[in-house]
Image (cartoon, rainbow, N blue to C red):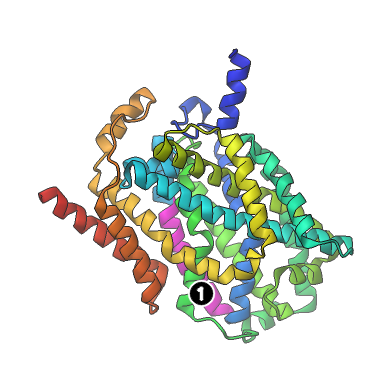
Amino acid sequence: MNKEEQKVVAQVDDFSLSRVPMDKRQPLWQVLAIQIGGFVALSQFMLGAELGYGLDFKTAVIATILGSVILEVIAFYLGLAGQREGLPTSLLAKWAGFGTVGSALVGVAFAISLIGWFGIQNSNFAAGIITISGQHWPFGVVATITGLLVTLSVIFGFKGLAWTTVISLPLFLVMIIMATVNMLEGHSLSTLISMAAPSAKLTLTTAITLVTGNFIIGAIIMPDITRFAKNGKDVFWVTVVGTTIGELGVNVLGVLMAHATGTEEILPIIYELTGSLGILLVITSTLKINDINLYSASLGFVNFFKQVFKINFNRGAVTLVVGVLGTIASVLGIIDKFAGFLTILGIVFPPIAAIIFIDYYVLKRRRKILDESRQTGTLPSYTETMHPVTLVAWIAGAATGYFVTWGVQSFTVLIVSSVVYYVGMKIFDKR
């Protein structure tokens, strides 16, 4: 294989099973743009509309702020570990509590959830195409075409994410401005803020769980993006700016728009406030977020097959398979289960963040071998298979979130899984 061929392979595989070298790290603006692009998406508006339809403005904002704080803490500390080690989450987890088999399970769990996100976003993409065309095209056919088209751009890895973000993010911001201006022309801001919720179907604690569930995967897979950052300061700004603009900014607008239109269905809201042009911009922006979904899902599956079956699949090839699966999910109607999907994410995935945090920053069980191998740009040669305490902590946290419905479920899950993992490991260490 000549140097040119090696260069192409490296670009497509995108360091999915190795550290990102320092000379391949990207400038702050590029990493930040991708992170903002992950937040500023139609799914975020869907969440805002869900909150606005079921809560008054003040309660919806409180839920967003509290949920965002949880997300920022998770995203920053995991993102910092990813930047320091140059590793994606599914590979970092191998030396941060989960071991070989555990990290493989983490990777495949992420990948499955991201396929669900891909299906939700692709459903919006296809529905937007049908709406703007005015034709009665079969949804399944359109969703199949849009899903496969989006898949193609992800094959070229991180650089593919960058160019789609540069194109689509400004267009999505234009749609936001158009919708906001038209909304305020027909309704006073004071009226929208003070009015009762169209449907008082949510509680504050449920809303916080929905907020954290909406981006908990994004927070946990922050290393997938920040492994390309140059330093910890960049990770801080990527986390704070991305979360503030995405969670608080977009959520609040979604809440106001739901109050203005009296519905939680996001595409009718966008169409009422912006017309066909707004739908067109939404369609364009969907490309951006689904690129990120497929990108991280492909990293998870690559790591899974490497750790469990010792097979080195190329990330570009895996992307094609994942894209097809996500397209099938959209055709089968996953978007109709949006709120339930967020609730599941809000209780199943926080234990992963808790275990990685406690192991990497508190117990530091594998920090020495990570530090030593980082100096040579390689990966540690030793790792455990999967510690039983890890599995117990994961199950205990998720079960607590499922059965204990009082309080903020996602926060309760974090606390329980952290305590179980810390105490369990201390007991095993003494033995």
> Which residue is more in the foreground, 260 or 102?
102
| Frontmost residue, 159 versus 180 | 159
Work out whether 267 lies above or below 72: below
Q: Quadrant of residue 44?
A: bottom right
Write the residue at 44% across / 31% down.
Answer: 18
* Residue 65 seen anywhere in this rendered image of the structure: no
Q: Is residue 38 visible?
A: yes
Give the residue displayed 70% in from the left and 78% down from the top.
263
Residue 265: image x %, image y %?
70, 73
**Image location (x, y in percent) of residue 32:** 57, 45
Mark count: 1
Residue beneath label 1, please?
207
Q: Residue furthest front?
A: 309
Three-letter amino acid code of the residue under disc 1: Ala
Element marked by disc 1: helix
Q: Residue furthest top?
A: 2
The reply to whether the magenta stretch includes residue 68 is: yes
Location of residue 415 by image quarter: bottom left
Q: Position of 104 compared to 174: left or right?
A: left
Residue 249 in the magenta stretch? The answer is: no
Locate residue 369 relative to residue 4 in the image: left or right: left
Picture coordinates of residue 35 (x, y %)? 57, 48
User: What secondary structure is the magenta-colored segment mainly?
Assistant: helix
Residue 336 in picture, x, y percent from top left = 64, 70
Looking at the picture, does residue 220 appear above or below residue 307? below
Range drawn in magenta: 57-75
* Crowd class of label 1 (few under 14; some 14 to 19; many from 20; radius 10 Å): many
At 67% across and 59% down in the image, what residue appears? Answer: 330
